[in-house]
C-alpha cells in the first residue's frame, strides 16, 4: 500500500502521509532522519543530537512504486524509505500534528 497524498510542512518540520485506508501519519523530520535506512546511517549512534542541517528536509522524490527518497540540507540523500517503513516510524506528538 502506498500513500495517496504526501505533504511537507517545513514550519512544523513534519511530513504528512495520508493512506487509502484512512490512516494519516504525521512524521517529524528528526524521526525520519533517525530512521534513515541507508547503510551509513544504520551505523550511527541514534541517541546523538542531530544538527539543524541534518533535520532540514529540502526535497523528496518517489522511488518506483514502493518508496520515497529524501534529501537533507547536509547533502545526505542515500536513504530509500519504503512505504512500510514510513508506517512504522513514530509519529509527532499530538500538539504538533495537523
Image (cartoon, rainbow, N blue to C red):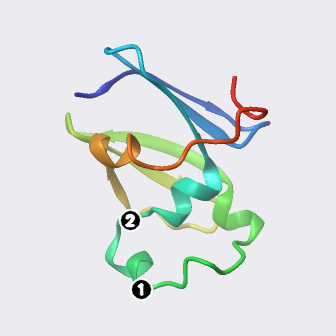
Foreground: 70 or 31?
Answer: 31
User: Which of the image's four quarters has the C terminus?
Assistant: top right
| Residue 26 against residue 91 in the figure, above or below | above
Q: List x then y, in percent, for residue 57.
A: 62, 50
- Reading the image, the residue beneath label 2 is 78
Query: Which disc, if any, is residue 87?
Result: none
Q: Determine the image quadrant of residue 43.
A: bottom left
In the visual, does 30 lie left or right of 64? Answer: right
Q: List x then y, in percent, for residue 53.
A: 71, 65
Q: CA distance from mark 2 to mark 1?
A: 14 Å
Q: How many marks?
A: 2
In the visual, does 76 lie left or right of 94? Answer: left
Query: Which disc, if any, is residue 43?
Result: 1
User: Which of the image's four quarters has the N terminus?
Assistant: top left
Identify which residue is drawn at 74% across, 72% down.
Answer: 51
| Residue 93 against residue 3 in the figure, above or below | below
Tell me the element at label 2: loop
Amino acid at each position: 500500500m502506498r500513500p495517496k497524498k504526501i505533504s511537507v510542512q517545513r514550519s512544523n518540520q513534519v511530513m504528512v502521509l495520508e493512506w487509502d485506508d484512512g490512516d494519516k501519519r504525521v512524521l517529524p523530520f528528526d524521526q525520519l532522519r533517525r530512521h534513515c535506512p541507508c547503510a551509513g546511517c544504520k551505523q550511527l549512534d541514534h541517541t546523538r543530537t542531530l544538527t539543524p542541517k541534518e533535520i532540514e528536509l529540502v526535497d523528496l522524490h518517489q522511488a518506483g512504486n514502493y518508496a520515497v527518497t529524501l534529501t537533507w540540507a547536509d547533502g545526505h540523500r542515500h536513504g530509500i524509505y519504503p512505504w512500510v517503513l514510513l508506517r512504522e516510524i513514530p509519529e509527532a506528538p499530538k500538539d504538533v500534528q495537523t
